[in-house]
Image (cartoon, coloured by chain):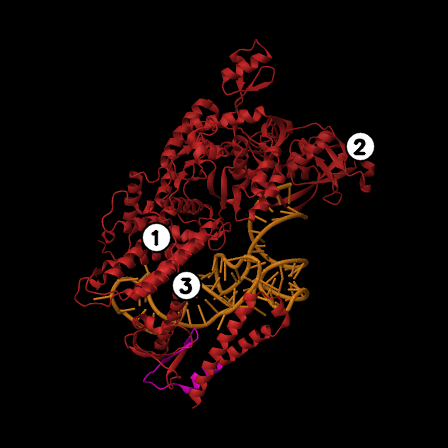
RNA sequence: GGGAGUUUAGCUCAGCUGGUUCAGAGCAUCUGCCUUACAAGCAGAGGGUCACUGGUUCGAACCCAGUAACUCCCA
C-alpha cells in the first residue's frame, strides 16, 4: 500500500538492488537458452565514476535487462583494467608520501605496495556502478592482472612471438619523461601551442666571419646536432656544399649535407639535423650515416653529452640557451610560431622523441583480417560512419610499441642470455631449456628477465576471450557458450586502442569476431559544448546526481540526450525530466490504487480499452524497431509518450470514475479495472530496462496480488506484440482533435471546464460518432451530442478530420472575427488545392509518379474540396 | 596538409528509399487553471528562409556541385 505523494527513490534503490543480488538474478551460467553477452569496457582500476561511465553503463544495462526480459541468458561481465601508467603513478605518489623512493626498493617490494593500493582503492568504481543499477554478474568480476588473466597475456605474447609477430628493435618512440616510460602512438595527444622559432647562426669552419642561419623551435638540442642539411637545388647555399660548421657555444664541428628532404621555403632553408631527438632527423641521419648523440636523460634533463647546461630540464635549458646564444651573438632573431606538440595522455608531459630498444607488435598482418570483419559487416559499427574512420586507421597502421618501462603490469617473458641474445618462454625454467639448446653450459643464473612490462591495452585486447578463460583453455564450455559476445558499448576514442585489438586477437586466437555490434557513444559535454573534465570542474558528480534525481531519473536523463555516436550536451534538466517522469508513473499508480471494483457496475469503457491496447501494441512495434537500430533515446521517448500521453493523459482520463464524495475508494467495474491494472503491469515491463528501481518497486505492490519470491519485474517476460486496430486508432485521433477543440473553445471564450456544453456534428466522413459519444461527453464535458445536416447558425464551429462541429453558446458571436478566420482558412485551402491540382494536371507527374502517390494526391484533393465546401457554407451562413 | 562528420524551433535532437495537410518530438517559453493521482501537475497556444549559392527533377530538408562555420580523427 502506497500513500506517499511523490516517489522517493533512495529506499527502493537499496532494497531492490540487494534483493536482485540475493536472488541471483544477475548470475549467468551456460544453459540451453540463447546467450546474450556483454563484456564491460573495463574502467581503470584507479578510476572513479564520471559521466562518461554513467552513459556507457546505463546503455549496457538497458541492453542487458532487455535481453534478460526477452528470455535470453543474459551475461554482463564486469571488471577493471590495471592501467599501468596511471596506477604506477598513484603508487609512486603514495610511496613518496610515506617517504619511500621507488628507486630504493625492489620490483617485488614495489608490487607489494601496488597490490595493497589496488586492494584498497581498486573496487570503488564497481561499487559505484551498483548505485546505477548495473546488473552485472559480479561473480565474474575480472581484473586484467588476476593470475589467470596475466597468464593469458603471457601465453598470447609467446604465441605471437613464435609467429614472428612480435620483435625487438631500436626505434624512435614516444617517451614520457614524467611517467619515465614509452607510450604508444595512440597515447599521444596532439596539441597546438604557441612557440618561438629561434634563428641561430652556425659559423663556417675556416672562414670565421661567414655563417649560415638555421631556424628551430628546440634550441636546447643544438648540442645533439649531427649535421646541417640544405637542399641541393637551393642556389642560395651552393657555396656551403662540402663545408663544415661549428655548433655555437660548444664549437663542435659538423658537416653540411645535401638532401632534397629539406623544404627550401620553410625557415631559412638550412635544417639542423638532430637524429637522437627527432623522428625525421633520425631517418635522415640513417640515410647519411650520421652519429646519434643523445643529450637527454630519461627524466628530460640534459646529460653530460650536452656539455653545457647539464642537469637542467629541457624547458629550462631552452630559455637559458636562448640567453647564452644571444650573448654569444649567435641568436639572429626569434619569431612567434604555432605548431603541434605531443603530450602524454596519462601524464600530460610533453612527449620526447627518443631512440630506444623496445618490443613491437607487427600490425600489418593482423590488421588486414580485422579490417575485413568490419567491412564485411560481420562486426557492425553503430553508427556506421565510424567504418570509414576505422578503415583509414587500419590501412595506415604502424607497428605497435607494446613495452612499457614500468613495473605494474605483465613482465615480458623474455630472458636475456649473457651473449645478448634472448629467449622467450613462459617461465625461467622453460627459458633455460630453450637457452641450453643454444649453449648447453647455460645455468639459470645466466638468465635475466626483461624488465619491461606489457602495455595495458595488450591485456585488455584479450578481454572478451580472457574473461571466459578462452586463451588458456580455448575449448572450455564457457568460452564456447558466450563467445562471440553480442554487443560492445564503448567510446569512439578507443576504437583503435581497444576495439581493433580485440578484433585482432579474436581472429588470431579463435578465428572469430569478439562481438557482433559495437555501439559507439559520444562524449559527454556540458551544455556549452565543453568536454566534461575535472580541471574545468564542469562535471556533476554522478553519485550526487543520483541522490538528487534518483538512479532511474539519471538513467532517463542520460538516455534522453544521447544519440548514438554523437556527443551529448548534458544538462541536469534532463535528469529533472527523468525524475518528473518517475513521479508521473508513481502518481498514475496512486490513482489506480484508489479504485475498488464494484461488481454491480457494467463496463462502459470498452472503446477506451480496445484503443489503448492497440496503441500499446503500436508502441511495442516502434520500440522494438528502435532497439534493433540501437536508437535507445528514441525507444525511450516512444515509451515516455506511451506512458505519459496515451496512458495517463488519455486512457486513464477516459476510464477514470467520477469522484464519489465520501467514498474511501472510487468504484469501478471489474472489466475496466482488470484491463487497467493489466496495462499497467505491461507498462512496467516495457519501462523496466530504463527505470529498473521504480518498476520493481511498483511490481510488488498488492495491486497486482501476491507475488512469489522470484516473480520480479527484472525477469518478467516482455509482452509480445498483439493486434492493432488501425481504424480505431485513426478514429480516436479525430476524437482527440474534437476534444482539444472543445477545450480550446472554452479557453478562448473563458468558459469554466465545469460548464457542460452542447455539441452538434455534421458528419461527412464514415465515422460513427455514436460509438464515441461517451468518450466525447466525458472528456469534453459535453451535455449532449446531436447530429445535424445543416450548419448550425450562430454557433462556434470547427472542423476535425472532414467533419463539422458546432458548439451553441449563449453568447454573441463576433461575426467579423469569425468571418476573417474562415476567410483565412478558405484562402489556405484554395492555395493548397491549386498546388494539388497543378500536380494532377501535370502530364509528367502523372506519367512518372508512383500510383500510390497519385492516389494520395487525389485523396488530398477530395479532402480539401470537402473542407472548402464546409468553410464556404459557414461563410454563407454568417452572411445570411 | 589528408580524411570523416555536423549545420532543421530558444535548447537537445528525429526526419529511412526525394512524394500526405511535411516542416516534427521532448524540453524551455507564453496564457489560463491549487479541476480530489500528480504544480515534479492539468488544459491550451505561439515559435523554423531546414547554414548559404547554384544545379538535377513534374516534385528537394532529403540527390549533385560549390561556399561558409563548427567538431573529430590522422599526419
Judging by the rendered image, the residue that carries numbered circle 1 is A549
Dividing the picture into quadrants, the one containing residue A288 is top right
Residue that appears at 59% across and 66% down: A849
Question: Which residue is most to the left?
Answer: A662
Q: Which residues are magenta?
A: A799-825
Q: Residues within 10 Å of mark 1 (few under 14, many from 20)?
A: many
The hue of chain A in the figure is red
Chain the render paints orange: B
Chain ID of residue with mark 2: A
Dividing the picture into quadrants, the one containing residue A123 is top left
Circle nearer the viewer, 3 or 2: 3
Judging by the rendered image, the residue that carries numbered circle 2 is A243
Q: Which disc is residue A726 wearing?
A: 3
Circles 3 and 2: CB distance less than 8 Å? no
Circle nearer the viewer, 1 or 3: 3
Instruction: Determine whether A289 is above or below A615 in the image.
Output: above
Q: Position of residue A643 (x, y in %)?
A: 35, 58
Circles 1 and 2: CB distance less than 8 Å? no
Q: What kind of element bears circle 3?
A: helix
Mark 1 and mark 2: Cα distance apart in space:
75 Å
Chain ID of residue with mark 1: A
Q: Residues within 10 Å of mark 2 (few under 14, many from 20)?
A: some
Amino acid at each position: 500500500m502506497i500513500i506517499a505523494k511523490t516517489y522517493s527513490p533512495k529506499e527502493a534503490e537499496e532494497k531492490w538492488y540487494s534483493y536482485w543480488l540475493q536472488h541471483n538474478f544477475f548470475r549467468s551460467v551456460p544453459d540451453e537458452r540463447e546467450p546474450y553477452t556483454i563484456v564491460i569496457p573495463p574502467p581503470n582500476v584507479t578510476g572513479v565514476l564520471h559521466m562518461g561511465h554513467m552513459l556507457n553503463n546505463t546503455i549496457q544495462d538497458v541492453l542487458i535487462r532487455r535481453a534478460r526480459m526477452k528470455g535470453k541468458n543474459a551475461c554482463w561481465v564486469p571488471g577493471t583494467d590495471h592501467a599501468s601508467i596511471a596506477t604506477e603513478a598513484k603508487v609512486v605518489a603514495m610511496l613518496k608520501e610515506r617517504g619511500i623512493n621507488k628507486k630504493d626498493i625492489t620490483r617485488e617490494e614495489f608490487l607489494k605496495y601496488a597490490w595493497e593500493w589496488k586492494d584498497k582503492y581498486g573496487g570503488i568504481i564497481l561499487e559505484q556502478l551498483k548505485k546505477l543499477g548495473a546488473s552485472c554478474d559480479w561473480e565474474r568480476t575480472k581484473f586484467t592482472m588476476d593470475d589467470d588473466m596475466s597468464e593469458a597475456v603471457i601465453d598470447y605474447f609467446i604465441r605471437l612471438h613464435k609467429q614472428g609477430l612480435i620483435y625487438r628493435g631500436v626505434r624512435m618512440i614516444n617517451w614520457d619523461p614524467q611517467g619515465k616510460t614509452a607510450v604508444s602512438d595512440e597515447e599521444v595527444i596532439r596539441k597546438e601551442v604557441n612557440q618561438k622559432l629561434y634563428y641561430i647562426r652556425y659559423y663556417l669552419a675556416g672562414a670565421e666571419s661567414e655563417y649560415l642561419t638555421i631556424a628551430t623551435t628546440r634550441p636546447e638540442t643544438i648540442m645533439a646536432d649531427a649535421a646541417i642539411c640544405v637542399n641541393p637545388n637551393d642556389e642560395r647555399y651552393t657555396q656551403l656544399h662540402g663545408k663544415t660548421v661549428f655548433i655555437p657555444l660548444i664549437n663542435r664541428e659538423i658537416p653540411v649535407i645535401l638532401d632534397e628532404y629539406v623544404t627550401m621555403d620553410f625557415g631559412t632553408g638550412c635544417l639542423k639535423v638532430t637524429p637522437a631527438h627527432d623522428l625525421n632527423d633520425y631517418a635522415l641521419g640513417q640515410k647519411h650515416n650520421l652519429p646519434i648523440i643523445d643529450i637527454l636523460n630519461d627524466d628530460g634533463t640534459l646529460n653530460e653529452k650536452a656539455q653545457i647546461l647539464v642537469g637542467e630540464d629541457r624547458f629550462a635549458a631552452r630559455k637559458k640557451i636562448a640567453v647564452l646564444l644571444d650573448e654569444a651573438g649567435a641568436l639572429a632573431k626569434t619569431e612567434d610560431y604555432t605548431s603541434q606538440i605531443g603530450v602524454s595522455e596519462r601524464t600530460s608531459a610533453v612527449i620526447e622523441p627518443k631512440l630506444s630498444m623496445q618490443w613491437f607488435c607487427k600490425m600489418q598482418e593482423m590488421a588486414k583480417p580485422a579490417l575485413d570483419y568490419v567491412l564485411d559487416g560481420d562486426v557492425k559499427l553503430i553508427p556506421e560512419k565510424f567504418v570509414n574512420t576505422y578503415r583509414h586507421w587500419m590501412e595506415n597502421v604502424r607497428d605497435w610499441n607494446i613495452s612499457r618501462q614500468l613495473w605494474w603490469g605483465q613482465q615480458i617473458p623474455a630472458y636475456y642470455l649473457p651473449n645478448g641474445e634472448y629467449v622467450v618462454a613462459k617461465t625461467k625454467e622453460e627459458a633455460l631449456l630453450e637457452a641450453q639448446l643454444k649453449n648447453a653450459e647455460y645455468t639459470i643464473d645466466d638468465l635475466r628477465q626483461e624488465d619491461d612490462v606489457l602495455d595495458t591495452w595488450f591485456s585488455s585486447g584479450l578481454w572478451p576471450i580472457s574473461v571466459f578463460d578462452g586463451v588458456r583453455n580455448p575449448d572450455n564450455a564457457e568460452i564456447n557458450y558466450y563467445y562471440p559476445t553480442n554487443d560492445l558499448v564503448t567510446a569512439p576514442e578507443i576504437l583503435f586502442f581497444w576495439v581493433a585489438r580485440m578484433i585482432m586477437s579474436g581472429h588470431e586466437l579463435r578465428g572469430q569476431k569478439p562481438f557482433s555490434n559495437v555501439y559507439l557513444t559520444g562524449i559527454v559535454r556540458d551544455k556549452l559544448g565543453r568536454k566534461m573534465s575535472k580541471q574545468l570542474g564542469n562535471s556533476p558528480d554522478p553519485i550526487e546526481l543520483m541522490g538528487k534525481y534518483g538512479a532511474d531519473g539519471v538513467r532517463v536523463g542520460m538516455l534522453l540526450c544521447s544519440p548514438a555516436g554523437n556527443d551529448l550536451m548534458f544538462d541536469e534538466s534532463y535528469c529533472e525530466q527523468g525524475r518528473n517522469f518517475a513521479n508521473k508513473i508513481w502518481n498514475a499508480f496512486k490513482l489506480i490504487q484508489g479504485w475498488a471494483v464494484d461488481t454491480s457496475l457494467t463496463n462502459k469503457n470498452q472503446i477506451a480499452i480496445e484503443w489503448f491496447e492497440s496503441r500499446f501494441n503500436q508502441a511495442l512495434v516502434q520500440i522494438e524497431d528502435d532497439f534493433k537500430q540501437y536508437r535507445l533515446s528514441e525507444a525511450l521517448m516512444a515509451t515516455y509518450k506511451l506512458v505519459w500521453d496515451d496512458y495517463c493523459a488519455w486512457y486513464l482520463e477516459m476510464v477514470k470514475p467520477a469522484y464519489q464524495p465520501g467514498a474511501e475508494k472510487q468504484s469501478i467495474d471489474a472489466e475496466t479495472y482488470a484491463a487497467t491494472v493489466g496495462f499497467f503491469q505491461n507498462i512496467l515491463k516495457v519501462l523496466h530496462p530504463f527505470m529498473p528501481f521504480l518498476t520493481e518497486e511498483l511490481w510488488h505492490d498488492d495491486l497486482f496480488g501476491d507475488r512469489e519470491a522470484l516473480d520480479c519485474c527484472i525477469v518478467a517476460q516482455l509482452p509480445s506484440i498483439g493486434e492493432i486496430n488501425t481504424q480505431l486508432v485513426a478514429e480516436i485521433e479525430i476524437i482527440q482533435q474534437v476534444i482539444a477543440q472543445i477545450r480550446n473553445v472554452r479557453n478562448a471564450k473563458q468558459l469554466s471546464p465545469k460548464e457542460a456544453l452542447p455539441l452538434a456534428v455534421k458528419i461527412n466522413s464514415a465515422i460513427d460518432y455514436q460509438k464515441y459519444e461517451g468518450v466525447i461527453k466525458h472528456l469534453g464535458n459535453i451535455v449532449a451530442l446531436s447530429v445535424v445536416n445543416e450548419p448550425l447558425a450562430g454557433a462556434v464551429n470547427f472542423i476535425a478530420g472532414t467533419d463539422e462541429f458546432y458548439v451553441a453558446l449563449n453568447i454573441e458571436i463576433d461575426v467579423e472575427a469569425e468571418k476573417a478566420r474562415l476567410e483565412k482558412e478558405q484562402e489556405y485551402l484554395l492555395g493548397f488545392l491549386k498546388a494539388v491540382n497543378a500536380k494532377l494536371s501535370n502530364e509528367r507527374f502523372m506519367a512518372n509518379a508512383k500510383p500510390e502517390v497519385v492516389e494520395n494526391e487525389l485523396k488530398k484533393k477530395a479532402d480539401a474540396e470537402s473542407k472548402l465546401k464546409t468553410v464556404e457554407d459557414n461563410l454563407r451562413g454568417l452572411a445570411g
